[in-house]
Amino acid sequence: MTAPAIELKGISKSFGPVQANKDIALRVMPGTIHGIIGENGAGKSTLMSILYGFYKADRGEIFVRGEKIEIPDSQAAIRSGIGMVFQHFKLVQNFTVLENIVLGAEEGALLRTSLGRARALLKQLSEEYELHVDPDAKIEDLGVGMQQRVEILKALYRRADILILDEPTGVLTPSEADHLFRILEGLKREGKTVILITHKLREIMEVTETVSVMRRGEMTATVKTAETSPEELAELMVGRKVLLRVDKDAAKPGETVLDVHDLKVRDGSGVERLRGVSLTVKRGEILGVAGVAGNGQSELLEVLGGMREGKGKVFVNGEPLDLTGAKSDARTRRKRGIGHVPEDRQREGLIMDFHAWENVGFGYHDDARYNRGLLMNNDALREDARAKIEKFDVRPTDCWQKAKNFSGGNQQKIVIARELEREPDLLLVGQPTRGVDIGAIEFIHEQIVALRDQGKAILLVSVELDEIMSLSDRIAVMFDGRIMGERLPSETSERELGLLMAGITDTEHDHTVEEVEANLAHSSGKAG
């Protein structure tokens, strides 16, 4: 019989009192795509970090192609043919693609010789696996989809035939994710083994042959993908039945809270990112903004959230909003009753080296509850943080943990808890469930709907079309900095929205797949 590409026996790992992995057993067969799913904090990334040599297991054994080995560091993993693409890329931003790929794998004393050899091999790998990327482009000038290709090329350049991808689509547009899956299928055809860590059940069902489920540090099941269902996998992940759709009553919209007229924005290079956007959001409704990333949605949130200047007219509760003056900052927005869950939690929502209790209070330090004369009342801040951590099921529950020590989904819960619990008149939400597991998605959606039902106005931006369809009461579609149209979820389809996202408004005409993909490629290219 063929030996497993990877076999783990009795792997356990603790961080102080927290047991991240408990007696894990796993077998991954060669030439397959093997999925690993579980809630945030279930131990998936820790297990793969042990396999890649970032952590050392407290006990257990690792076998690669039937041979027992020790993996004390990532160099040992690479020598064993294991490569890993992390959720947050490990690239030097001001280096070129070629320099990043060679970094740490230079051959000989002359760098020019290494770069020449790498360029030739990179061209071969790019053509073989459809990983086309400009070798001389700087990383900082590439969109996230292209950066991910660089990470995969780095692993292949080091001759990896076992590739681990940790939440690979968390930062990708739908079209980029589809291209990634084609790349993974190509790798499998070439005999490579792929381990896919994800919380997205649709991806698991589409591209894997076998899936292993983790819950609270333990491996609860391994099943053939063809013999299971999203509902069964969700229950195995969470330990209870999970509603895979948003359960909400019809909206009861009231007066207008947000009124935007002819909003325009230029970026630092002078490129027009918003080209006269107009929209309204009423009390008691959720307006979802759909579109391929890079078509103005981010700039819309940034202007309304006080992070970027713009031109036009914006009114909140009938009063004008300053877009260019001294009162156009985020602090003033909060005082106007505007909450903001930014799209990038790590760069804009949290300070990663600060504790959870400090992050829960950011932006609201002048709240009377947090002040004691001239000094901050840190005890009150910590008490408030503990209550929010419990309500939003943040794991681990220790408010003294630094933000960087939480998984991506739990980092998101901290930001969501901070903003939603303020019950703002207008909530701006960017990618609310990016990198969040199925159980937490259900909870976050429930909290957003509950805020709507309290009579609050919500502007939701998401690249997840099923999230837009199920959570929104109205949908606006953006393309190239413009609103292409508005639709009611009950009166449209994913096909119609997809055409609008590609800049095509004539839905009575049967457009070719090539035409739609060309428009999507054009629009997604703006994100870089």
Image: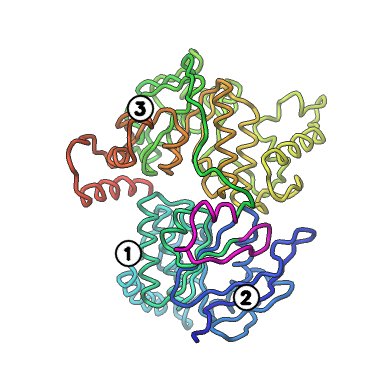
**Residue at mark 1 to residue at mark 2: CA–CA distance:** 34 Å
Colour scheme of the picture: rainbow
Residue where numbered disc 2 is placed = 8
- Which mark is on residue 132? 1
Magenta part of the chain: 214-236
Q: Is residue 327 magenta?
A: no
- Which mark is on residue 277? 3
Q: Which of the 4 image quarters holds residue 399?
A: top right
- Residue sitting at x 60%, y 81%: 63
Asked if residue 223 shows in the view, the reply is yes
**Residue at mark 3 to residue at mark 2: CA–CA distance:** 54 Å
- Residue sitting at x 56%, y 81%: 64
**Residue at mark 3 to residue at mark 1: CA–CA distance:** 34 Å
At label 3, the amino acid type is Val
Q: Earlier in the sequence, mark 3 or mark 2?
A: 2
Q: Earlier in the sequence, mark 1 or mark 2?
A: 2
At label 2, the amino acid type is Leu
**Picture coordinates of residue 20, whole percent (x, y):** 70, 61
